[in-house]
Image (cartoon, coloured by chain):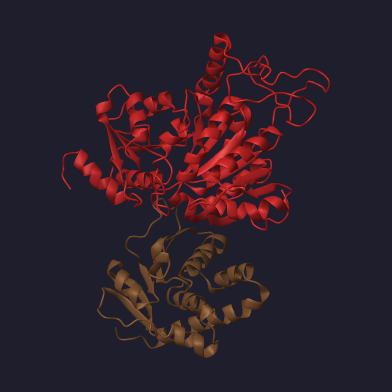
Amino acid sequence: MPSNEPELVRFIQGNEACVEGALYAGLEFFAGYPITPSSEIMEHLARRLPRRGGKFIQMEDEIASMCAIIGASLTGRKVLTATSGPGFSLMQEALGYAVMAEIPCVIVNVQRGGPSTGLPTQISQGDVNQARWGTHGDHAIIALTASNHQDVFAMTVEAFNMAESYRTPVVLLFDEVVGHMRERMVLPQPGRIALVERLRTSVPEGVDYHPYLPREDGRLPMSDFGGVHRYNVTGLYHDMWGFPSDNPKVVHGLIRHLVDKIENNVDAIARYKSYYLDDARTVLVSYGATARSALHVVESQRRKGQKFGLLELQTLWPFPYDIVGEACGRAKQVLVVEMNLGHICAEVKKALNNPRNVFLINRIDGVFISPTDIRQALRLIDGRGV
Amino acid sequence: MSRTRLVFSGSGGQGVVTAAILLAEAAVLRENLFAVQTQSYGAAARGGATRADVIISESKINYPMVNQPNILVCLTQEAYNKYAPIIRPGGLLLVDTHYVKIERKVEARQRELPMFDTVMEKIGRAVVFNICMLGTLIGLTGLVKPESILAVLQERLPNELIEINRQAFQSGWELAQASTRSPQSR
């Protein structure tokens, strides 16, 4: 860390907390195109990344931004782009390429109202399923989120670590309220959070390197593109040399590998926070900014002696069905608080034996859901009217 | 003071957002309190009534928005008309006499002070109006120590601007002191 950090406690926007996390994780290359409500990420990186020897490029659009970070990652760099819903839509094709070619990269989507250009300056969580299925074809993806700046920082570092560990794109799904709000964040000392660095091949120059030949532990060491090895990278199904193949055995093996490397590690990838769940009869499930309103309600209900609890999800994909089942299985009712038409609510229902006890509490009008909104929905669900 | 919710309102360019950030930053960095700051974005921020919200608290803050402020500051008539009804009963309403004419009574302590006129008279530059307002607010409420605000200003501003900001803060603070000595009869 350079010494131009005078304070360890900072008072900053969520978008700046994301920048701090990315720099802490060792970001070396950013390419992006500004869009509300994510622009502060670019703005701060434009100033700070070059100062520490990194590269910052403002591209002509989000398609180019995504392609640029893929190329930079292949050369051995830790890379990031940041956008919002409309830009994230444009990135989907290249995102699929990064999934297929197994290229570590981190994409921030500070969500706003959609579809299309939608509500640029207002909160939504409507991109949860876009992060999961926005790019075509069967695949797996990692998507993380956070409700406060300390966690934005932590999840951003985690995103870089997971991108390297699993050789995959990782999506950070923040939202307008967390992105723009200012609050306290403590910047950890360097070394306090472990960082995962690029796994590079030990194959020396002059010896054939197989870019897609897994080691015994299943991981694929990389060779910096443009370095000592020549190899092919493609979005087509490919063999261990990286050359296109439509051999059914190769195709089946690759799709299973792409999905299993993530879906078989759900427990390792799952990040979440539990509040008062031990004896909770009513469990709220929430994530991102809305988890703040949910926690407000849970704490005030507890003060009245009501057995409320909160499960705050930070890993949205791969969805931690077992953890949700465990946390909610004994509850009388489960209330999913989110700002969309029920993206995570649908997954929570899949996780539980009795999906009829699962209710969606939402707002989809660009107004941040308040504790009062949640309480009113609770009264309706309980049959007590408004 | 366990939790104070503030709304600063005015028109775009008056510096209400900056004032809100400075106050919250002083609370967090200088006094080890919890604070969150949010603001309105979009069309309202360009010309219409704009607002910035701050919550200052001794404990962690979950819900970050302000629905009913304990303290409401209005620097334009439009902002006053729009936000006066949301003040929490028993709260403090601070308005600038140059821009705002109070039209109805709200169930709150009302302070109408010539902050803008004082700035123009003593410093002659409208750009520090918001800092004068902050001085008045701190003088009236003691939310944070004046030194905390001054330290944050010192950290953020280029050297040549520190002095006029310090003067603006000081004159706002004095305005508050004078008004507390001879309370307005509202």
A283 over A5 or under it: above or below: above
The spot of residue A381 in percent (x, y) is 21, 38
> Residue at 57% across / 32% down in the picture?
A169
Residue at the right extreme, as displayed: A206
Q: Which image quadrant for residue A167? A: top right
Q: Which chain appears brown?
A: B
Residues A133 and A90: in front is A90
Residues B176 and A150: in front is A150
> Residue at 67% across / 41% down in the picture?
A26
Total numbered circles: 0
Report if residue A319 is visible in the image.
Answer: yes
> Residue at 58% across / 19% down in the picture?
A237
Residues A42 and A226: in front is A226
Q: Which chain appears red?
A: A
Q: Is residue B114 left or right of residue A27?
A: left
The spot of residue A282 in percent (x, y) is 29, 35
The spot of residue A16 in percent (x, y) is 56, 52
The spot of residue A161 in percent (x, y) is 61, 34
Residues A76 and A152: in front is A76
A175 over A221 or under it: above or below: below
Report if residue A8 is visible in the image.
Answer: no
Q: Which image quadrant for residue A170? A: top right
Q: Is residue A175 left or right of residue A3?
A: left
